[in-house]
Image (spheres, rainbow, N blue to C red):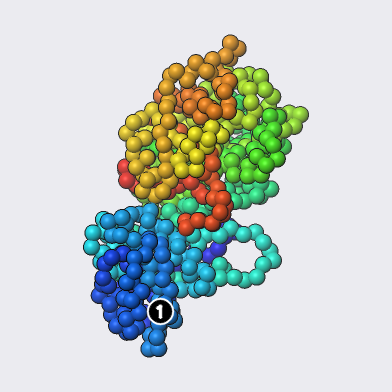
């Protein structure tokens, strides 16, 4: 994968004598703990003086130590007020620290934590969350063959001091697993469309086998045999035929039935014959963000050997115009047997999901189905850049996911899934219209209502993550480019609520 080297995090008992950079993690308004105080005494009191004024979480105060201190740099990283410390605030602080270290060209550091009174997380969890933030910010995607060697190319070695070693190592397993899953998903989204397409997608799934994930790919002939004419219709304008990839991870001790995750994997969406404008098309390589998130989730669960049974189903296609492309007013028989009258060919994602949801529900009979898709412009207009949309037939799961999203900073707002929306999906010629007449403002709940017809009444959550797949600029937890939105929320949800499923 074309990305920067992964940082190596090591749990240690003490600050190494030759540590080049020492980072003191400190809550605002609290004094120095024993480790920081000992360092401060050696450094002539510069740490205490630097902490004399309040600092927001994520603020890095760079200090040049006096002679006699082996480290050439001491950094005080503010974690903010103790009572406000959270998994998200810690990760963001770690991201800010990573950016600071990069700016200084550093490749090694020792993070030092003393007990924080009033913090709701253990020392191991605090250090691991900071480490995760560092890893997420450190990720960089680059396909340039000619560029100067930069600090970004250095492999980082980060030592962590201040927690029970066994507990910290366990927490780091999870942090690194989540980090790897996010990175993998980001790279899939960042790949240009001549690198990632229906013919090459399977190659990018092969490395998952080493993590214990089964990979199966259904080609166009198999999809035809299964009656999956909806996904085949979407891809009919491309010379690269659609595929469905099935991923399966069975953690030790997990049971039946599995949890199922379905991802929209449109590798490029031109809109088909209802073609998009040029500017609308520039980021459409990222229209497979839902499928990428499913891949990242399964990888993160497998790497930490989570005792859970999960399947991932990815609907992979290109939506392109040609003489063979899907046309408005075609009527398609889906894999479920229901017929669908097509209008706007740029509403292709729900057609793909229709076949994938029905296939998932009937083949695996899962305990719950969750789909992720960059599906509708209307959810972006309705919720802006803060929230993604969540629709669900299960109140408990919906509440759990919203809570999980708040923990990791992937926020969701529950939207209505009401039978009244079915009125807008009636067709005199087919079982369903594939969207209502109003595509501009109210499409998201109609899309969810449409998809519900293919879930076989399984507990189901539809996550409309349109607009969340890309960072428009560098942020504490990632650079401009792919976000892997959904990976962290779903990992948090599974780990907190569904282990043993």
The image quarter containing residue 48 is bottom left
In the picture, which quadrant includes the N terminus? bottom right
In this rendering, is residue 64 above or below 419? below
Instruction: Please give the name of the residue rendered at 40% of the width and 86% of the height, measured from the top-left corner.
Output: 66
Number of numbered discs visible in the structure rendering: 1
User: Where's residue 484, x and y in %?
Assistant: 50, 48
User: Mark 1, residues whose alpha carbon is within 10 Å: few (<14), some, or many (≥20)?
Assistant: some
Residue at the spot x=31%, y=55% of the render?
84
Q: Is residue 387 above or below residue 28?
A: above
Identify the residue at the far front of this view: 53
Q: Position of residue 203 (x, y in %)?
A: 60, 49
Using the image, determine if residue 423 lies above or below residue 217: above
Is residue 47 among the parts visible in the rendering? Answer: yes
Between 402 and 272, which is closer to the camera in this rendering?
402
Q: Is residue 316 above or below residue 472?
A: above
Q: Quadrant of residue 264?
A: top right
Instruction: Tell whether 384 sits left or right of 149.
Output: left
Q: From the image, tell me which residue sits under label 1.
A: 19
SS state under label 1:
loop
Q: Is residue 253 visible?
A: no
Q: State the residue at coordinates (38%, 28%).
A: 393
Which residue is rendered at x = 43% and y = 80% of the image? 64
Q: Is residue 105 left or right of residue 10?
A: right
**Could you say where residue 24 lies in the image, as x and y percent from the top left?**
35, 71
Foreground pick, 219 / 8: 8
């Amino acid at each position: 994968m074309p990305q920067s080297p992964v940082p190596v995090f090591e749990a240690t008992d003490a600050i190494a004598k030759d540590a080049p950079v020492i980072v003191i993690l400190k809550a605002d308004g609290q004094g120095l703990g024993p480790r920081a105080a000992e360092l401060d005494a050696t450094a002539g009191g510069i740490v205490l003086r630097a902490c004399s004024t309040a600092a927001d979480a994520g603020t890095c105060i760079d200090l040049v130590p006096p002679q006699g201190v082996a480290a050439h740099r001491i950094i005080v990283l503010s974690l903010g007020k103790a009572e406000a410390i959270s998994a998200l605030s810690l990760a963001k602080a770690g991201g800010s620290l990573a950016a600071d270290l990069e700016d200084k060209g550093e490749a090694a550091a020792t993070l030092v934590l003393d007990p924080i009174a009033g913090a709701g997380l253990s020392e191991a969890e605090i250090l691991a969350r900071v480490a995760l933030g560092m890893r997420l910010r450190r990720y960089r995607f680059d396909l340039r063959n000619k560029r100067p060697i930069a600090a970004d190319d250095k492999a980082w070695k980060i030592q962590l001091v201040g927690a029970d070693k066994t507990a910290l190592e366990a927490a780091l397993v999870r942090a690194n697993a989540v980090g790897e899953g996010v990175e993998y998903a980001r790279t899939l989204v960042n790949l240009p469309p001549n690198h990632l397409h229906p013919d090459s997608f399977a190659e990018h799934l092969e490395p998952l086998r080493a993590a214990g994930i089964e990979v199966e790919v259904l080609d166009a002939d198999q999809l035809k045999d299964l009656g999956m004419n909806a996904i085949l219709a979407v891809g009919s304008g491309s010379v690269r035929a659609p595929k469905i990839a099935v991923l399966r991870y069975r953690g030790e001790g997990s049971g039946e039935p599995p949890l199922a995750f379905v991802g929209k994997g449109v590798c490029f969406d031109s809109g088909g014959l209802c073609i998009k404008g040029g500017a609308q098309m520039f980021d459409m390589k990222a229209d497979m963000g839902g499928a990428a998130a499913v891949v990242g989730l399964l990888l993160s669960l497998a790497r930490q050997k989570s005792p859970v049974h999960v399947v991932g189903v990815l609907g992979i296609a290109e939506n392109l115009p040609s003489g063979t492309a899907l046309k408005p007013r075609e009527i398609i028989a889906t894999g479920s047997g229901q017929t669908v009258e097509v209008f706007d060919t740029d509403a292709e994602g729900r057609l793909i999901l229709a076949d994938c949801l029905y296939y998932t529900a009937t083949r695996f009979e899962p305990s719950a189905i969750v789909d992720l898709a960059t599906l509708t412009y209307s959810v972006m207009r309705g919720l802006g850049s803060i929230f993604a949309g969540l629709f669900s037939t299960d109140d408990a799961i919906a509440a759990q996911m919203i809570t999980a999203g708040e923990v990791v900073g992937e926020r969701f707002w529950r939207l209505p899934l009401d039978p009244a929306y079915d009125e807008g999906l009636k067709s005199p010629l087919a079982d369903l219209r594939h969207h209502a007449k109003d595509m501009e403002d109210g499409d998201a709940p109609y899309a969810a209502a449409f998809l519900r017809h293919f879930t076989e009444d399984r507990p189901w959550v539809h996550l409309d993550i349109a607009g969340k797949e890309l960072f428009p600029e560098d942020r504490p937890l990632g650079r401009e480019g792919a976000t892997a939105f959904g990976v962290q929320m779903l990992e948090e949800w599974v780990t907190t609520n569904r282990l043993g499923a």
